[in-house]
Amino acid sequence: MTQPELDQVYKVHENLYIGAYWPRLNFDKFKELGITAIINLMEEDLYDPRPMGFSYLYKGFPDDWYPPHSYIEDILTFIDKHIQKGNVLVHCAMGISRSGGMIVAWLLKENPTWNWDDAMDYVYQSRLIYPAVEIKESILDFFEEREGRRRE
């Protein structure tokens, strides 16, 4: 991945963007894009955009970690709450694994007939992502617990 790719945010769905840590300093660009809410999934909470008028959720975790279902629920709830009011940016360090996985989770929630590959293919139209196995398994387990079926 090149530096210019890391400097971008990508629109994956209406009002939903994915990105890496690098563009996080460009809050003016975020405002131009209509981004009003930011979800940070990096291990460290290095900034606070709330004083600049953004809604903010920090749910950081390591890339090789099985995120608790409560994290997934909080992230999906935050997206649902803020996507109606403006654009939501979901980012992690590289914009590939953690943020990609949580966007796939939101798409699975929004599209009950989709499986994991359907949601991945949808995101691939905008951005290459590759959620870690642990993240994928946690999301699939989350939906199996919630719906009684596995969305593989």
Image (cartoon, rainbow, N blue to C red):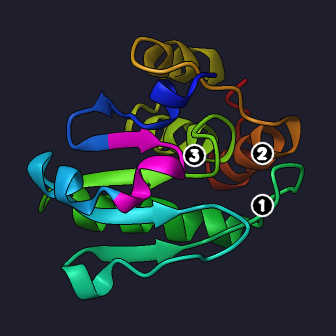
Does the segment drawn in magenta span residue 19?
yes
**Quarter of the image that includes the C terminus:** top right
Report helix, strand or loop for mark 3.
Answer: helix
Which residue type carries mark 2?
Ile
Q: Give me the residue at 88% from left, 56% from top.
A: 65
Which residue type carries mark 1?
Pro
Which mark is on residue 12? none
Decide if residue 68 is on the left or right side of residue 75: right
Label 2, on which residue?
135
Label 1, on which residue?
67
Report helix, strand or loop for mark 2.
Answer: helix
Which residue type carries mark 3?
Ser
Label 3, on which residue?
99
What's the distance in space between the residues labelled 1 and 2, CA to CA? 6 Å
Tell me the magenta residue range: 17-25
Viewer-proximal residue, 120 or 59?
Answer: 59
